[in-house]
Image (cartoon, rainbow, N blue to C red):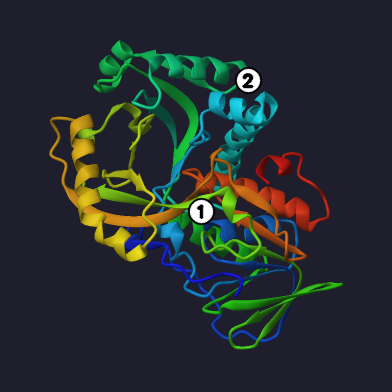
Amino acid sequence: MPTPKKDLRGGRPIWADTPRIDVKHRSRLGEEKCDVAVVGAGISGALVALALAERGHDVVVVDRSEPCRGSTLASTAMIQFELDTSLTELADQKGAAHAERAYLRSFAAVKALGDLVARHDIKCAWKERQALYLAGNEHGWRALQDEAEYRKRIGLPSLFLSGTEVASTYGIQRTGAIISEGAAEVNPAQLAAGCLRAARRLGARLYSPHEVTKVHPHARGLDLETAAGITISARHAVFTTGYAVIPGLPRDKFEMVSTWAIATKPLPADAFWPNRCLIWEAADPYLYMRATWDNRIVAGGEDSKLKSPERRDEATPVKAQRLLAKVQKLLPGRDIKLDYAWAGAFADSPTGLPYLAPAPDLEHCFAVLGCGGNGITFSVIAAEIVRAWAEGKTDPDAKLFQ
């Protein structure tokens, strides 16, 4: 079984109640042949399929459940170039050249995603934003000042703000912060659905529900066998199955983490902070938040190493109240009330970088596993690396993510 079944989210994400998240797909699957088979129809699979279809590749996408209904719905969809590991820390861990290239590639990925949304006219509430990174118990103002200076040296648009400047501009009491350009917010389900529709217009075929249970590599490629015994023959296969990880990946390189998120009831338009920038903090446990198109606040955090889906979901009411209390404390004087609460799972790596590489024990297969809080940004990078791999080329930054 290439992709073990896992319950990767619980509760009711706000995106589940938004329009334009359904995608036409075929339920009847016959014997198929294609250039590339993409297993998984969430945001990663959608971006990979579209990147390949844009280059004329014959693509089949298959998912064991309805498209865009897996981990993608659990995302808070804060699109940032910043990684969970700071540039300074990553340089200490992996070397300056590696860290700088990873950050610059992440910055380029946000712009590339914005260009893709515009190119295909995807209606997904895409909005360019700044990002405000607040000092906290993990990194104080001095560390953030050093981080901002390092970013500026390599061309990343970041500026350190003193505690006085943070208070006067945003009404938030912290010892300092970094304000950065190059971020965005989006509806993740609409984005995934829009990419799948665009890929279909370019000839990709989407099948659901069909579960791939066996992989049979051979000299010309591989055959993917479904639970119903139907075969998809392809030159290459890409597994974009979220955190239902295929066998053969180096599982000791990351661990599964539970996280929680909330969405508030709509607020008056004047209740928001300046420019509605994305906000996150250098704290443990940390808080991050953003605005939505309909004047809500989406916030997340309270991460835990809790691995049981049942216990994770049971903790949602308590975690939701903690998140709400943190938002209320950060933004005093507003009548902020809870409307949605949900939980999800993600993979955490020591560097905060994803795993994007050919599957070691499955010939002709590529594995996409985003780690940390930059899943959508990493999915853009994954699509670019996969496209080069499928064409027999090597992306110049491929080794950064292996």
Taking the image as shown, residue 295 lies to the left or right of residue 282, namely left
Q: Return the residue nearer the eye: 366 or 159.
A: 366
Q: Which residue is mark 2?
A: 154
**Which amino acid lies under the numbered mark 2 shown in the image of this protein?**
Ile
Q: Residue at x 18, y 40 (%)?
A: 325
Q: Residue at x 25, y 23 (%)?
A: 172
Residue 184, how many percent across, how many down?
46, 38
**Which amino acid lies under the numbered mark 1 shown in the image of this protein?**
Ile
Residue 132, how many percent across, how many down?
39, 27
Q: Return the residue nearer the eye: 43 or 280.
A: 280
Residue 332, how many percent across, how many down?
16, 30
Pointer 2: residues within 10 angstroms few (<14), some, or many (20+)? few
The quarter of the image holding the N terminus is bottom right
**Label 2: element kind:** loop
Q: Residue at x 23, y 50 (%)?
A: 320
**Cα gap from disc 1 to disc 2, whole angstroms:** 32 Å
Q: Using the image, determine if residue 397 lies above or below residue 29.
A: above
Q: Return the residue nearer the eye: 280 or 252.
A: 252
Q: Which residue is most to the front?
A: 252
* Res 287 → quadrant: top left
Q: Return the residue nearer the eye: 363 or 58.
A: 363
**Label 1: element kind:** loop
Looking at the image, can residue 119 be seen?
Answer: no
Mark 1 / mark 2, whichever is N-terminal: 1
Q: Which residue is most to the right?
A: 219
Looking at the image, can residue 312 be seen?
Answer: yes
Residue 253, how many percent across, how many down?
59, 48
* Res 274 → quadrant: top left
Q: Residue at x 32, y 13 (%)?
A: 165
Q: Which residue is mark 1?
A: 122
